[in-house]
Image (cartoon, rainbow, N blue to C red):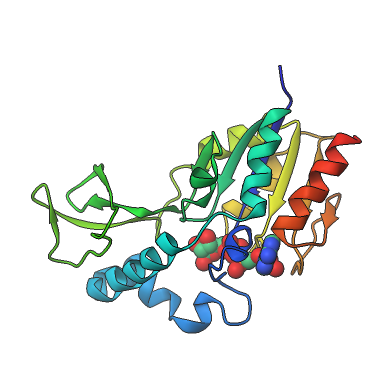
Amino acid sequence: MKPKLVISTGAGMSAESGIATFRDAGGLWEQYPVMEVASADGFARNPGLVHEFYNRRRRELVKAQPNAGHYGLVDLERNYDVYIITQNVDNLHERAGSSHVLHLHGELMKVRALDNEQLVYELSGDNLDTTPTTLIEGHHVRPHIVFFQEAVPNIEPAIKLVEQADVFVVIGTSLNVYPAAGLLHYVRPGIQVYYIDPNPATVPANVHLIKMGAGRGVAELKKQLDHQ
Ligand code: APR
């Protein structure tokens, strides 16, 4: 039985793949008004603007590749049962080959029927764009994204994973957005917590900081775990 390594990743995980984070200088929230392009009210007010915002991010994502950090997490599966909980909506963990990826904030390459949230469709190839009039199987669709002001349905399974962790690792998140930022508090007493971030806004107590980018940081994590 391999030890369970649970990893919570944020936008910094994909920074070295060329995908903008949200709150770094030049980040997405500097370029776009977050409550207009990523909230439930914004989508109700101007769905076309929201569709276009996600269309643009999809077109960037298909040109991006997983980075050394993503592949380093796949390597860790040799000695650990690795479960990734990600705030990221990109599919770079999956494309790198990670076996267990749980998305808290949705998935950029997917849309779902407005009239039935169980109907989820994967976009691919050259039809990456949607608009308010797009019909898939006769249904109008919306991004399969958890907008601000909406519930995070996967937080329950995420908490259960963290409660079972033998090691917990946080990579590339500013720990600004709840409930994701609160996962840290579900770690069992005595379990080692690592935090990989080159420029952390806050460093929680009892956390072992690896002050590096994801690529080098995951390699350093592996070294430290091997000598644990
Ligand atoms: N490697 C690792 N971490 C990095 C790197 C890198 N190369 N570059 C930047 N970072 C770190 C930053 O220092 C910062 O702490 O990544 C973090 C990015 O923080 P945010 O931009 O706030 O992204 P995130 O924490 O994922 O945002 C959470 O907010 O807007 C919502 O839904 C959106 O999922 C997102 C959520």
Q: Residue at x 81, y 35 (%)?
A: 191
In this image, 47 relative to 147: left or right?
left
Establish if 105 lies above or below 63: above
Q: Residue at x 54, y 34 (%)?
A: 99
Establish if 147 lies above or below 48: above
Establish if 110 lies above or below 83: below
Q: Residue at x 52, y 83 (%)?
A: 30
Query: Between 98 and 172, which is closer to the camera in this rendering?
Result: 98
Query: Quick one: quadrant of the C terminus?
Result: top right
Query: Quick one: quadrant of the N terminus?
Result: top right
Q: Residue at x 41, y 75 (%)?
A: 35
In this image, 177 relative to 133: left or right?
right
Q: Name the residue furthest left.
A: 138
In this image, 174 relative to 225: left or right?
left
Q: Quadrant of ligand 1?
A: bottom right
The image quarter containing residue 188 is: top right
Residue 122: x %, y % from top left: 29, 48
Query: Between 227 and 191, which is closer to the camera in this rendering?
Result: 227
Residue 184: x %, y % from top left: 70, 47
In this image, 17 relative to 4: left or right?
left
- Residue 204: in sight, yes or no? yes
Residue 161: x %, y % from top left: 61, 33
- Residue 80: in sight, yes or no? no
The image quarter containing residue 38 is: bottom left
Q: Name the residue furthest right.
A: 227
Query: Between 220 and 180, which is closer to the camera in this rendering?
Result: 220
